[in-house]
Image (spheres, helix red, strand yellow):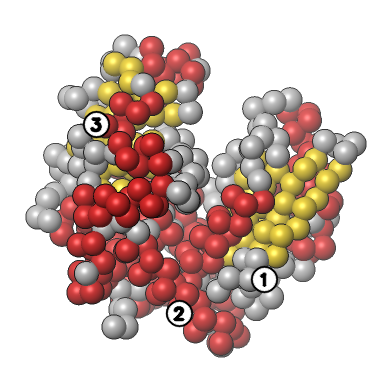
Amino acid sequence: MHSSEIMKFEDKDAGLCGWVVIDSLFDGQASGGLRMDPNVNADQLGTLAMTMTAKYGYYGLPKGGAKAGIRHDPGGSPARTQEVLLAFGAKIADLVQERRYFPGPDMGTNDECIRLVLEGAGVRTNDTSLWDTTDSGLFTAAGVVESLRVALARSGRELAGARVQIEGIGAVGSNAWRILQKQGACVVAVSNRYGAIVNEDGIEVSPLLHWLFIEGGDAIQSYPGARPLDRLAFYELETDAFLPCGGSFTLGEEEAATLAAPLIVAGANAPVFGPAWLTLEERGSAILTLPDFVTNSGGVVGGALRYAGLSANETVQAVERIVGSAVTGLLEHGSRNGAVEKGGRSLVKLAEGIAHNRFQAMQAKPRSHLLLWGMRAKRLGLLPDFVSRAGAARYAAALTDWVREIEA
């Protein structure tokens, strides 16, 4: 499953330094998000590209895994950001036009950023992607919350009344928060890049997000509806679950040693920094870590279904069924072979093996995959909307059953 190809691109005049990392190809193609961050590097992107392969493999989606990154501050000059994005697009034009790599939004980028990259690559912007990314954060969040519900149910708990902490309150974290609040869970603590806050009686999502919109993200610890926490105190909170929904590699050794929550359900890709896995292994059954590429795949699964014609509400419901079924099957399989009880990285390793086998099986017969042909026909305008929508509904139902079935 892993045969990484790392490509670096520079344009000194535009101030560009960026990478594309292709971990795997499916029928000669790969896709994955383009992130923009002043500290991004090739090693990080390599890990994230492998995560994309695992994500596509686990859910049987006909895509190779890749990731791209530009070393740039997205909060800087808009004109400079535009220049960098156009320059990056020009550098990766051959990759994009051949669809050897096709970008999507990620940390620090949005649909407009991708449009600029595609413009720089000479690709018509009305033919952007096989996935619809408009509600990606919502779809990812729906899968994360359903994963949490399934994990809690395993120990006889309900989502209503559960006490949850969320790291990162962007598109995924804020949507997960809204869903949790609607379903009766109590979000007692949240954090962003500037700090963390707690209220043991719960924090309401809308008032805080409005406050941050007016005052700025760096004002979070001044929010009158909660008290501020220092960095490690956030991880020391006794909650039922920790939802990392912000950046990648945020849970380091110190945080892993401090974390009191017995359950990690990720909305972010690769939230655990490499060495921290050793700490989680040492803590054993004290913490159950669900694989991030299983819990946060609602964005890619939902994007395909939404593009095919399902409504946003229908897509959310389909994502909940599919991701919930995946987590149910994994926990059942993990319980039978002891991975759940062992804790640490055991369940993640088990899921990686499943993803690898499924991806290899897909690669063996790439042109027999109906979703691949259906999406290509849709993109070329050869598939009527009512046919595409009916096909998406049937595909979602079949995937719900398939993803739960794991060979012993």
Q: Residue furthest right?
A: 13
331 w.r.t. 277: above or below:
below
Q: Of label 2 and label 3, which has the lower sequence position?
A: 3
Disc 1 designates what residue? 29
187 w.r.t. 158: above or below:
above
In the rendered image, residue 105, in percent from the top left (x then y), is placed at 60, 48
- Residue type at mark 1 is Gln
Which of the pair 350/369 is nearer the observer?
A: 350
In the rendered structure, the answer to whether residue 100 lies left or right of residue 164 reads right
Question: Which quarter of the image is occupied by the N terminus?
Answer: bottom right
Distance between mark 3 and mark 1 Cα atoms:
44 Å
Q: Quadrant of residue 178?
A: top left
Please count the marks in the image.
3
- Residue type at mark 3 is Leu
147 w.r.t. 367: above or below:
above
Distance between mark 1 and mark 2 Cα atoms:
19 Å
In the rendered structure, the answer to whether residue 88 lies left or right of residue 352 reads right
Disc 3 designates what residue? 237
